[in-house]
């Protein structure tokens, strides 16, 4: 029984049929197959590139790419094109798609089964029967906020011992993100909103209602700065708590108040050590207003989007290295698709929200693979991968950062890494965060490799 297992493992680790198996090792410094400590530095990968600073897509090409996404990808919502009245049929479809009663068992944070009465209340709060034709209202998000399957903060899980993947968590929105309000929860505390990339429930306290022109015009204000760090915070201010120590995540674009008099304090503080930016705030009546805030000059940000280069893609991805995995942007982090989205967003490139939509989007240069594609073809494609290419397996995406002796290496936000040891046994590192790894030795489970489960390769380049 042991000989066939060893042969299978050897074939799995081989680059292609007929080639010798690669001898992988697990360095003591990392405990992860094929990853040396030096490879956890982005400059290791940048130094290997022949033209790291060559612009892949210039600003005009990025704008054309985003327009192509908005036109061709059905997962993207054009808020500007929404009708003056949102019709009941459309809103009911959006809400029902996300907030239908779960049929599988769910468990609470205490590990016990979710009580039927509790689930009944959650479903009832979605108030699907109250959906009606309503005038389209618009708002700006004023604070990073969760998007939920149901109008509740209740955390639920698929297994008694699972505490990481909250099945009601969908995504997150960030300060300045525009939304259209489609529906209200029974308790009046939540709105079902449509954002450009997702439709879900958000707490009303994180959205300020405003005129359509003011809401959609915020993203077009100039000059502006783009957050290039994993996250930055505005300066603390007791004078204006609504913009005090506000978190801004990678890729968030904020207008700069270039007209602010240099000698005039901002919320009680001279602004010469910071950028004076303008942020949306929510008044007590829920209406939209704008307030100045200070973004420290030492906080990573740029006057405009970063150039789309391979070096920038690698360096931006490594800013998240080690960040805790957060399903649906939980834990103040992000998941695999959110991770690659925010890396690309810092260069102005928009991606669909979820892996399922990203993988099949017709807006990019897609290579589709099926179960009928041979391992030989798959390996040939992997050898052609370049930094920034996105590789998809069902439910997961990785971003290529380079090749070492013909082996593609990737960075991805993942719950864990599986591989086979020399004896054929399955090993696992519970990375539970943004991680670096080689691609070909990774296993989905005991029988399926990443390579054989690839469904799509998306190239955001000519």
Image (cartoon, grey):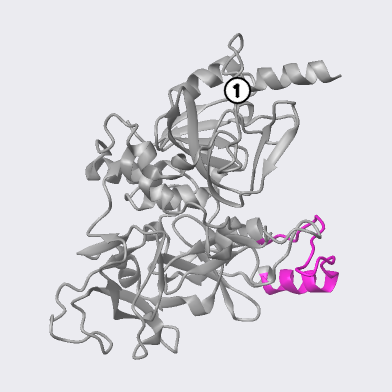
* Residue 4 in the image: above or below residue 293: above
Residue at x 83%, y 73% (from the top left corner): 117
- Is residue 90 visible from the viewing direction of this image? no
Viewer-proximal residue among 434 and 149: 434
- Residue 398 lies, with reference to residue 16, above or below; the image says below
Horizontal and vertical percent position of residue 164: 67, 59
**SS under mark 1:** loop
Residue 388: which quarter of the image?
top left
Q: Mark yes or no: residue 158 visible.
A: yes
Q: Which segment is the magenta one?
A: 99-127
Task: Report the residue marked by disc 1.
Answer: 23
Quarter of the C terminus within the rendering: top left
Residue 70 highlighted magenta (yes or no)? no
Residue sticking out furthest to the right: 1
Q: Main secondary structure of the magenta part?
A: loop
Position of residue 149 measured from the top left corner of the image (x, y, whole percent): 64, 62
Q: Is residue 111 magenta?
A: yes
Count of marks, rendered view: 1
- Left or right, 192 with reference to 55: right
Residue that appears at 78% across and 21% down:
5
Quadrant where the N terminus sits is top right
Image position, residue 2 (x, y; %) = 83, 20
């Amino acid at each position: 029984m042991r000989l066939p297992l060893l042969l299978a493992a050897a074939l799995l680790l081989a680059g292609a049929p007929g080639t010798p198996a690669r001898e992988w090792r697990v360095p003591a410094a990392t405990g992860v197959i094929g990853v040396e400590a030096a490879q956890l530095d982005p400059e290791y990968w940048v130094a290997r590139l022949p033209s790291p600073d060559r612009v892949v897509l210039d600003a005009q090409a990025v704008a054309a790419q985003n327009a192509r996404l908005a036109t061709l990808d059905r997962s993207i919502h054009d808020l500007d094109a929404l009708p003056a009245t949102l019709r009941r049929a459309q809103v009911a479809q959006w809400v029902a798609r996300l907030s239908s009663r779960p049929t599988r068992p769910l468990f609470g944070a205490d590990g016990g089964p979710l009580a039927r009465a509790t689930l009944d209340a959650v479903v009832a709060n979605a108030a699907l029967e109250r959906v009606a034709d309503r005038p389209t209202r618009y708002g700006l998000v004023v604070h990073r906020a969760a998007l939920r399957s149901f109008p509740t903060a209740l955390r639920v899980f698929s297994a008694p011992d699972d505490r990481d993947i909250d099945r009601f968590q969908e995504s997150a929105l960030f300060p300045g993100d525009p939304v259209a309000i489609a529906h209200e929860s029974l308790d009046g505390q939540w709105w079902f909103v449509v954002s450009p990339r997702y439709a879900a429930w958000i707490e009303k306290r994180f959205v300020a209602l405003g005129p359509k022109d003011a809401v959609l015009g915020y993203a077009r204000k100039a000059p502006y700065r783009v957050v290039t760090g994993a996250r930055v915070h505005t300066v603390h201010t007791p004078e204006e708590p609504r913009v005090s120590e506000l978190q801004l995540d990678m890729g968030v674009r904020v207008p700069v108040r270039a007209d602010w008099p240099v000698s005039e304090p901002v919320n009680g503080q001279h602004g010469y050590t910071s950028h004076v930016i303008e942020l949306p705030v929510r008044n007590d009546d829920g209406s939209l207003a704008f307030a100045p805030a200070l973004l420290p000059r030492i906080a990573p940000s740029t006057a405009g989007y970063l150039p789309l280069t391979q070096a920038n893609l690698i360096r931006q991805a490594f800013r998240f290295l080690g960040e805790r995995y957060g399903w649906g942007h939980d834990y103040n982090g992000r998941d695999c698709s959110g991770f690659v989205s925010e890396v690309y967003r810092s260069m102005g490139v928009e991606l669909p929200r979820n892996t399922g939509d990203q993988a099949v989007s017709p807006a990019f240069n897609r290579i589709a693979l099926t179960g009928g594609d041979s391992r030989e073809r798959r390996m040939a494609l992997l050898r052609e991968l370049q930094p920034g290419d996105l590789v998809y397996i069902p439910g997961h995406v990785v971003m290529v950062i380079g090749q070492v002796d013909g082996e593609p290496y990737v960075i991805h936000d993942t719950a864990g890494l599986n591989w086979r040891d020399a004896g054929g046994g399955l090993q696992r590192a519970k990375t539970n965060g943004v991680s670096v790894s080689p691609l070909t030795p990774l296993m989905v489970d005991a029988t399926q490799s990443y390579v054989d489960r690839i469904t799509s390769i998306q190239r955001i380049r000519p």
